[in-house]
Image: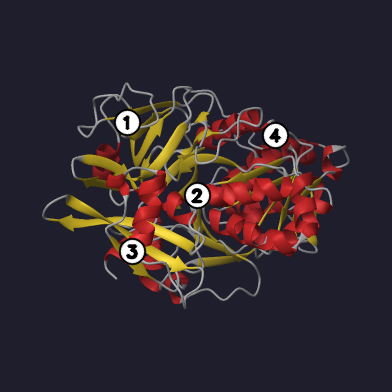
Amino acid sequence: MSSPTPALFPALTEALADPDGTAAHRSALRFGDRSLTYGELAATAAPLAARVGRAGRIAVWGTPTLETAVAVVAALLAGVPAVPLNPKSGASELGHIVADSAPALVLAAPGDRLPAALAELERVDVGIGPAADSGESGTPPAASLAAVLPELPPEAPALIVYTSGTTGPPKGAVIPRRAVATTLDALADAWRWTGDDVLVHGLPLFHVHGLILGILGPLRRGGSVRHLGRFETAGVTRELSGGATMLFGVPTMYHRIAEALPDDPELAKALARARLLVSGSAALPVHDHERIAEATGRRVIERYGMTETLMNTSVRADGEPRAGTVGVPLPGVELRLTEEDGTTAVEAYDGETVGEIQVRGPNLFTEYLNRPDATAAAFTGDGWFRTGDMAVRDPDGYVRIVGRKATDLIKSGGFKIGAGEIENALLEHPGVREAAVTGEPDADLGERIVAWIVPADPASPPGADELADHVAGRLAPHKRPRVVHHLDALPRNDMGKIMKRALAHD
């Protein structure tokens, strides 16, 4: 039998065991003007854990609130898999997730209005504070510590997080406790992340980035998180000026920061104080990297992961924050690039040869819930996970993502071209505010490169020939766009990723 997973949250475990100890008084969570110390979080989450401990799975209504964080922590204390739900999901998607995961309960903040798709589930309101009623009045926080903190094997599921479902209904990735623990510990090694760090972010709490990294990460270290609720540059300024040391964001957030910096010296000063600025969930354009670095003296570092793998690579805190790269594999993670047959490894680390990323390690998910066919298709026979992401590697091992295999790898004129480098080149043009690149069939070239542009000045957008010459002068002539479309905005999902399939069908 495998040994139990060590406590996911040592400081919280200490606060449960010793409610008057030092750990209990440390700040844990803050959302706006509402906050909990580790002792208060223990006193709130422990009785809720006792309440849900008999459930097979629970759903959590994933609003960016203190209640969502408490609900997920309670589920992890109880050893019950939590299914975070996106409050913006449509009825059919929610209905599919509920039917597929079959949760026994749904946890939500008091007063939240839940949609009809959740009507058949028993509801448990998440009360906040030591006197909160978890549904079983009179259950003291530490009454049954052994029941609240069961010994669980590393493979025990912690979360079931549903993918975006771009090629069909969303699939539930079963994330075990060992993946959560090993990923967070690997990031702690890469980022020198300690209990003294205070993280600020405004990310959604139904996805890996905001929930696992942004909430569970600080709690595992015994540190603190300040959630903005809704991302605003004023909130970033306030929290980094008030003692926060780390900022997590997605490219759309950093783009807003880059746009605001020329007219906001206080924001620049606040960012300069941060120990670490981290971007993820999509590639951060090089242009925004450079604008932020020039204004603040701080460089944003990027990391690379996905729902099924949690985190795979990162630029290290003590490494070179090279714009356009996602760093090197994290401790414990094996990474290789493969040719189109999916088995032959790409040997060239020349910064040019493109291959599909495959990864192997303790950070991986266990399976797609109820989808053995999809699980089998996602892995090679020797345990490598096929990410579907295309990349090149520099001679020193740094990984540079060039796009998704399905939407960002363009085969034109005998060349394999990554959309990402063309997008970065387009964004260096002063007339381009946003850019996306796709491929479309071409009788002569196989595929031609198509640029989708949000112009900086809609009344005077840059022309196709101008943009083609701009790209050809920075990259190579065969990488220039052959077609240019002008848009008012690019379609994006909740994490700020451009939805290229929507562009292709525009």
Of residue 314 and residue 378, the one placed in the foreground of this image is 314
- Residue 273, quarter of the rendered image: top right
Picture coordinates of residue 344 (x, y %)? Answer: 24, 25
Disc on res. 193:
4
CA gap, disc 2 and disc 1: 23 Å
Disc on res. 113:
none
Please indicate, yes or no, whether residue 228 appears anywhere in the rendered image.
no
**In the figure, is residue 23 to the left or right of 159?**
right
Task: Kindly identify the amino acid type of the residue bearing the numbered disc 4.
Answer: Trp
CA gap, disc 2 and disc 4: 20 Å
Q: Residues within 10 Å of mark 3 (few under 14, many from 20)?
A: some
Q: Residues within 10 Å of mark 2 (few under 14, many from 20)?
A: some
Secondary structure, mark 3, is helix
- Residue that label 3 marks: 464
Q: Residue, x 28% and y 63% (percent of image)? A: 504
The answer to which of marks 3 and 1 sits earlier in the sequence is 1
Q: Is residue 134 above or below residue 289?
A: below
- Residue that label 1 marks: 353
